[in-house]
Structures are given as C-alpha cells and as structure tokens.
C-alpha cells in the first residue's frame, strides 16, 4: 500500500548517497507517520537493514512510528505551567479524549503529547493544538476548545 509513494520519494533522489533521513522525513510528511510497511520498502530500496532504519527513525522526534491523529494536542507540563495547574489540564484532556500522552484516539481525531515548555510561560497553563497556543486555561475553556476541533 505504501510502496508506490515510497518509490516516488526515493526516485526523486536518484542514486544519491546518504538519503535515508531525507526519505524518512519525506515519508513522515506524506503519511503523517511512518508505518512498518513503509520502513520495509525503504529497507528494500535503499538496501539498509530494517532494524537500522527503525533505530534511526526512533531517534528523530520529527518522525513518528505511530499513527498521528488529525489534531495534535500538546499539553505543557513545564514548571511555570505545572504550578499554574497543568496537571489538572492534562487530567481533563486525558479524561475527555480517553487517551494518555503518546496515544491517539480510536477515531484518529486526536493525538496527545506533553512538552516541557512552549515558550510562553506567562500564559500558563498552556496547550498547543495544531500549532495554535491557548493560554490561561481552565477546564471549561479547554472543553470548548476541544469541542471546536472538527
Ligand atoms: S512552562 Fe509552559 S510555556 Fe513555559
């Protein structure tokens, strides 16, 4: 299923050497994550062992080896947000979405992550959804924000 797209990505680079990372990043961009079948095809085409590709892919935070939801929710649990109630916000997100950090909802709508600082500590507690920041959060604000994600 992923063979055709992987072939197209690799063909773009012709016979260039050392393209593994670029191929992985392109595949991440194409699929939103990198499935095992895609790694298998990359392994066949680049003649690099599957386990080696898996290790490289696991190392880069920009690459996900698990399906990612349509909306990525990142809850800041850094010190400034923590003292302003981040644990409660994280609990509320977990309860509402019924997932833990690192997981994706069964319907593929949301993925949840925690981060250590989003760089706007004065607004804490803060979450980021799809690149947009929401600060000074409380549970009811959070409920509205999540409900507005389609
Ligand atoms: S600690 Fe949360 S934004 Fe900095």
Image: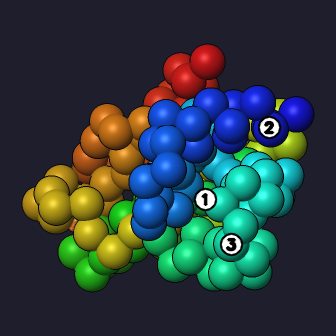
- The residue beneath circle 3 is 48
- The residue beneath circle 1 is 64
What residue lies at 31% left-to-right and 54% top-to-bottom? 126
Please say whether residue 50 is visible from this viewpoint.
yes
Using the numbered discs, state the Cα–Cα distance from disc 3 to disc 2 in whole angstroms: 18 Å
Using the numbered discs, state the Cα–Cα distance from disc 1 to disc 2 in whole angstroms: 16 Å
Please say whether residue 141 is visible from this viewpoint.
no
| Camera-side residue of 57 and 3 | 3
- The residue beneath circle 2 is 2
Q: Which mark is residue 10?
A: none
Q: Which of marks 3 and 1 is nearer the N terminus?
A: 3
116 left or right of 38 in image: left
| Camera-side residue of 46 and 124 | 46
| Camera-side residue of 86 and 52 | 52
Name, please, the residue furthest toward the front.
Answer: 15
Q: What element carries label 1?
A: loop
Q: Residues within 10 Å of mark 3 (few under 14, many from 20)?
A: some
What residue lies at 38% left-to-right and 51% top-to-bottom? 127
For the N terminus, the quadrant is top right
Q: Position of residue 132 (x, y in %)?
A: 31, 36
The answer to whether the residues at label 3 and label 2 have Cβ atoms under 8 Å apart is no
What residue lies at 68% left-to-right and 72% top-to-bottom? 48
Q: Is mark 3 on a helix, strand or loop?
A: loop
13 left or right of 95 in image: left
The answer to whether the residues at label 3 and label 1 have Cβ atoms under 8 Å apart is no
Q: How crowded is mark 1: few (under 14 residues within 10 Å), some or many (20 or more)?
A: some
Q: Residues within 10 Å of mark 2 (few under 14, many from 20)?
A: some
| Camera-side residue of 82 and 107 | 107
């Amino acid at each position: 299923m992923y063979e055709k797209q992987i072939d197209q990505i690799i063909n773009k680079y012709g016979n260039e050497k050392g393209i593994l990372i670029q191929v992985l990043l392109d595949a991440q961009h194409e699929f939103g994550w990198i499935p095992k079948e895609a790694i298998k095809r990359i392994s066949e085409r680049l003649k690099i062992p599957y386990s080696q590709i898996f290790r490289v892919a696991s190392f880069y935070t920009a690459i996900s080896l698990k399906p990612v939801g349509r909306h990525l929710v990142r809850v800041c649990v850094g010190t400034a947000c923590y003292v302003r109630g981040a644990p409660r916000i994280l609990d509320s997100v977990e309860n509402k979405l019924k997932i833990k950090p690192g997981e994706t909802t069964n319907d593929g709508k949301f993925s949840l992550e925690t981060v250590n600082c989003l760089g706007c500590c004065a607004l804490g507690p803060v979450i980021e959804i799809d690149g947009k920041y929401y600060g000074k959060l409380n549970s009811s604000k959070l409920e509205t924000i999540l409900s507005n994600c389609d």
